[in-house]
Image (tube, helix red, strand yellow):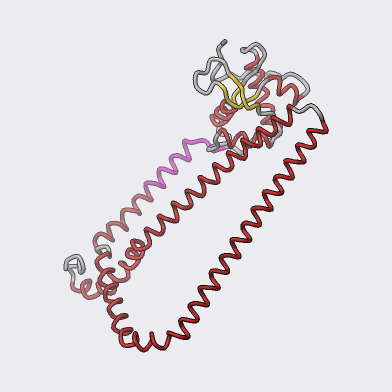
Amino acid sequence: MEKIIPTEKLGATLLWPITGLATGTPVLIRKLTAPQRERRAEAAALRAKREELAAEAAEAAEAAFVKKVSAETDPIKRAAMLQAQEAAKVAAREFELEQAKAARKETRSKLGDTAGAAALLLVVGGPLIWSLARPWIQPGIGILLGVWWIAALIHAPAPAKTRAKDAAPADADDDQGDADDDREQTEPTDRPPLTVAELTTTIEHMVAIRAQRDEGRGYVHLAEVLESLQRHHYYPGLTARDFGAVVRAAGLPVEPKIRVAGKKEKAVSPGFSAEGLTALLGRPPQLPAQPVPEPAPAEAV
């Protein structure tokens, strides 16, 4: 009884059947719909994982195809390979559209069958069901409302706890606001992305600096460039894969296997070389006007 009517004052006790129903109904609804929300969240996570795996597979296939096309010296065969690749993409897209169209058609067919069966049941069995169920409808609704009312009162938060919970978030918001103000004063603001020219110059300088230490090869990992830029508050939150897409969109040559001497972990990784930048720029990579210290100098193999 204390759980159903957790009040001490007379006025609050008299109003509790209404206030408890109002405050307990949202809690009860959340509890009843929690399994469905969890299933939807799990399904969304699975879809995201499947899309991520599909994107990785497509990226690997695209890289393999680009490597194969680059190795082909005959321009006629290269054009034929590109044409075949484009035709395969178009065919795959058409197949995907056809599958989606068939799925929609099947869904509409199932809905039509269900609606037809429901209409037939309503026309044929409706009067009989109504004559049998009619005496029980009013008592059933009353019992359902009574059970819901009692469950809402059981799940309703106590008035004292409600006040405590209302006060706590206010204090927490104030503390959070003070912490945000402190962070705004101490943390630097993230900078906008570099332009294509600025990004090219930055990578060129890093490759030129590394070339002085690895016998002119200038091997620099993509992750090294991103780490250096993020220390200066560029591209926050990006992974090496995301940054690779940014670099490729800028037209910079990312080689799939770059071995940097002296690195024990992930010694072979996508990156840049002096040879690749020379082919792009038409000249060897140049050092910056004022040399910039490199965070992780490479050692000789």
Q: Say which quarter of the image contains residue 227.
A: top right
Residue 175: x and y, percent? 37, 46
Residue 276: x and y, percent? 71, 23
From the viewer's side, name the closer residue of 207 and 267: 267
Q: Is residue 182 magenta?
A: yes
Q: Is residue 166 left or right of residue 209?
A: left
Q: Residue placed at 66% from the left, 37% from the top?
A: 62
Q: Is residue 31 left or right of residue 117?
A: left
Residue 58: x and y, percent? 62, 40
Q: Residue placed at 41% from the left, 47% from the top?
A: 177
Looking at the rendered image, the quarter that the N terminus falls into is bottom left
Q: Residue placed at 74% from the left, 18% from the top?
A: 284
Looking at the rendered image, the quarter that the C terminus falls into is top right
From the viewer's side, name the closer residue of 178 and 95: 95
- Asked if residue 197 is positioned above or below residue 258 in the image, the reply reads below
From the viewer's side, name the closer residue of 87 and 216: 87
- Per the picture, the main secondary structure of the magenta-coloured stretch is helix
Q: Say which quarter of the image contains residue 182.
A: top left
- Asked if residue 21 is positioned above or below residue 253 in the image, the reply reads below
- Residues shaded magenta: 175-190
Q: Residue placed at 68% from the left, 37% from the top?
A: 249
Q: Is residue 85 left or right of residue 174?
A: right
Q: Say which quarter of the image contains residue 201.
A: top right
Q: How many marks?
A: 0
- Asked if residue 89 is positioned above or below residue 198 in the image, the reply reads below
Q: Residue furthest right?
A: 76
Q: Is residue 183 magenta?
A: yes
From the viewer's side, name the closer residue of 176 and 13: 13
